[in-house]
Image (spheres, rainbow, N blue to C red):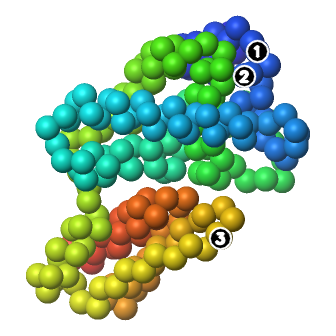
Amino acid sequence: MNEVEKFIGYKFKNKKLLTQSLTHKSVNTQINYEKFEFIGDSIINFYITDWLYKKFNNEKENNLSIRRSQLVSKKNLSQISKKLNLHKSIKIDDNINISDRIHCDLFESLIGAIYLDSSYGEVKKIMNYISFYFIKTNTIYDFKGTLISLFKKGKIKNFFLDTIIYKKDKKIYVSKIEMNGFYFYGFDTSKKNAEMNSAQLAYNFYKKSIL
């Protein structure tokens, strides 16, 4: 077993799938992790949705959506990827910086590769095994709702939120919040996540400014 297999507690039957899941398109334009990433993204979303529904089945749909958005966010998944040290096994051009986006892609592609090598049942075992890294859902951080509430109470002035599609072909959303003369931006392929990212930055700034 290599280092990645040791970290996740799974031994690949087809080692080529593991290799491909860690290969960036900069070193191989044909055989890389992009399609695995697509599969992994869907599986992770399903796993988290199923887990949340069973654990918080009395909560409203909006609260469940907020929890899911936080758990499957690029920031959260990239942190898991780093803790699993996936970047140490990546095959990538030396001139490319391993960004949070790439860290996130690695985790998603690995999950996709495990599914292709086995089954969803096996993926679920792996996700259960590593879930302690990222399932922290005791508190719902509805940053956008909190900011709106603060604005209505007069604790924040000049609050304005606007979200646009930056790249229509890739559907990259850009969310901009103007608050007290400062600007905060969030980017994501999901409008909800883009707004959450910008709202989180704005809220963190607000918290620091009142200390």
Q: Which residue is mark 1?
A: 15
Instruction: Confirm whether residue 132 shows in the render.
Output: yes
| Between discs 1 and 3, the one toward the N terminus | 1
Q: Which residue is mark 3?
A: 167
Q: Residues within 10 Å of mark 3 (few under 14, many from 20)?
A: few
Quadrant of residue 38 in the image?
Answer: top right
Task: Give the left or right position of residue 204, taking residue 172 as reference.
Answer: left
Name the spot of residue 45 as percent of width and height, x first: 45, 38
Circle 2 SS class: helix
Instruction: Confirm whether residue 107 shows in the render.
Output: no
Q: Amino acid at mark 3?
A: Lys
**Which quadrant of the figure contains the C terminus?**
bottom left
Name the spot of residue 96 as percent of width and height, x first: 79, 53
Q: CA distance from mark 3 to mark 2?
A: 32 Å
Circle 3 SS class: strand
Q: Amino acid at mark 2?
A: Leu
In contact (CB < 8 Å): disc 1 and disc 2: yes
Q: Residue at x 51, y 13 (%)?
A: 122
Depth check, mark 1 against mark 3: the one in front is 3
Circle 1 SS class: helix
**Which quadrant of the figure contains the N terminus?**
top right
Residue 18 is tagged as: 2
Is 84 situated above or below 45? above
| Between discs 3 and 2, the one toward the N terminus | 2
Q: Residue at x 61, y 20 (%)?
A: 114
Q: CA distance from mark 1 to mark 2?
A: 5 Å
Depth check, mark 3 against mark 2: the one in front is 3
Name the spot of residue 182 as percent of width and height, x first: 40, 86
Is 155 situated above or below 91? below
Task: Give the left or right position of residue 2, taking residue 7 as reference.
Answer: right
Q: Residue at x 67, y 12 (%)?
A: 12
In contact (CB < 8 Å): disc 1 and disc 3: no
